[in-house]
Amino acid sequence: MRLISFEEADPLLTWTNVANAMHDGHQLPKAEIGDLLLQHAPNALLSRGAWIDGMGMAMKSMSVFPQNEDLPSIQGGVLLFDGKNGYLKALLDGILVTKWKTAGDSVLGARLLANPNPKVHLMVGAGTVASSIIDAYQEIFPSIETFLIWNRTTQRAEELAVQKQSTTKAKLEVATDLEAACAKADIITSATMSKTPILKGSWIKPGTHVDLIGAFKPDMREADDELITSAELFVDSRETTFKHIGEIEIPLQAGTISKEDILGDFYDLCVGKIGRGSSESITVFKNGGGAHLDLMTSTMIFDQIIHN
């Protein structure tokens, strides 16, 4: 078994390679996945397993402690198994896999759904994920000229802007008015811990791509009903988002949307079965971060380490 640390693998990876690995992984037979969520509010333990014929199996267990100050709010590890004989190939740092899987998931969604050559990206939230998102979008969309950063606490947005300025070619600006920032953006990524919607459909201009990351538990939402119902709605995985994630499940249970309103997931998008309807459409992509994406990402990382 190989132990793969963050420090060993992180410098070897690119967002293009991760997005490509996920795209290629969706050409294989459909993954079998299973989730287990244990909650002692406000904390949680999330375990996700996946099996893909032709690739292998993985189990990721992550603790989520949102009130941590000196430690990351998300910690854990990934067990990567060989699909032919069940051999435990590697134990990977969970923060490593989560970093590259989460932002990779979002930029693949945007690569498949956003209008070409976006100029302005709005980052809603200024936590750990936000830093990776800025890096990922900068690499995948070099046309971006400005990154706007909005956070409930403006100081954190300012700190992130200073932190990223030396490694970001585009301009970094702190937004204090979320509605005004949404009106400027070609792509919006939201990665917050909000339980109530913070993005309103009335704020979003035609042609915008909205990338939703933050609502990963059944009681969490970032987009309001108007945004969910007025947009073309996509998810990374139906199996991951149905029943497990409030962003989709709350409006489903309320009858605001039906399962048929989910136009596609990566198994549809990556083979060209469906995509953006028109350049004026608002597209909403829910990043649910399913275990099959952890498996695809972990396999790519393992291959990079072995062949480096």
Image (cartoon, grey):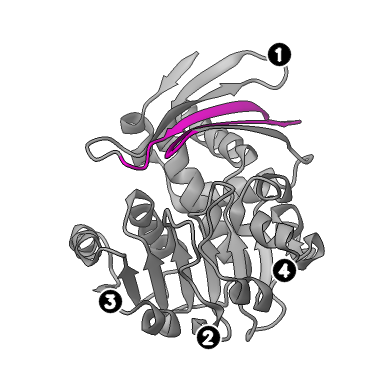
Label 3 – label 4 distance at C-alpha: 31 Å
Of 101 and 74, nearer the camera is 74
**Residue drawn at x 47%, y 78% as measured from the top left:** 118
- Say if the magenta span includes residue 59: yes
Q: Is residue 68 above or below residue 131?
A: above
Q: Position of residue 91 (x, y in %)?
A: 48, 21
Mark closest to the chain's N terminus, 1 or 4: 1
- Say if the magenta span includes residue 137: no
The residue indicated by pointer 2 is: 205
Q: Which residues are magenta?
A: 40-67
**Residue drawn at x 61%, y 42% as measured from the top left:** 290
Mark closest to the chain's N terminus, 3 or 2: 3
Q: Quadrant of residue 228?
A: bottom right
Q: Secondary structure at mark 2?
A: loop
The residue indicated by pointer 4 is: 256
Q: Return the mark for residue 85.
A: 1
